[in-house]
Image (tube, grey):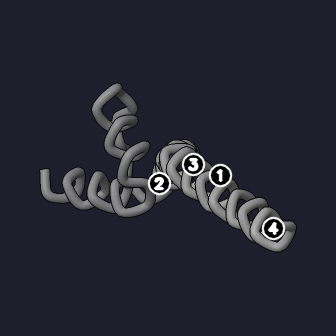
Amino acid sequence: MGLGLEVGVALSYIVALAVILIVVTILLKPLKLILKLIINGIIGLVLLLSVNFFGKFIGIKIGINIITIIIAGFLGIPGVILLIIINYIL
């Protein structure tokens, strides 16, 4: 009888641990996405400001407005490169 109770307690701990791991995994995915967006936005904004600062020496100027900030923020480095290409074409 004592052996069955110990196995039941052990199984309870295993199930509880599995549930905790599943809940933590589910909760961490949105946090990782939010952190990635914040880091990408900071990198994009810094790069956008750097392109404007150093680009004035070679004639590159990207207007800073809400659209360019959103593009640089969401896309990061590729977004700023896209803005430079669009600026060059237009």
Q: Residue at x 81, y 67 (%)?
A: 1
Q: Earlier in the sequence, mark 2 or mark 4?
A: 4
Mark drawn on residue 1: 4
As measured in the structure, the alpha-carbon distance from the residue carrying label 2 to the one carrying label 3 is: 48 Å
Q: Are marks 1 and 3 in contact (CB under 8 Å)?
A: yes
Q: CA distance from mark 2 to mark 4?
A: 79 Å
Label 2: which residue?
55
Q: Are marks 2 and 3 in contact (CB under 8 Å)?
A: no
Q: Is residue 81 above or below residue 24?
A: below
Determine contact: label 2, label 4, CB under 8 Å: no
Residue 19 in picture, x, y percent from top left = 59, 53
Name the one closer to the observer, 12 or 42.
Answer: 12
Mark 3 Cα shell of 10 Å, populated few (<14), some (14-19), many (≥20): few
Residue bearing the label numbered 3: 23
Picture residue at 35% right of the left edge, 27% below the top: 65
Alpha carbon distance from label 4 to label 3: 33 Å
- Other residues around mark 2 within 10 Å, as few (<14) / some (14–19) / many (≥20): some
Q: Earlier in the sequence, mark 2 or mark 3?
A: 3
Task: List x then y, in percent, for residue 6.
Answer: 82, 67
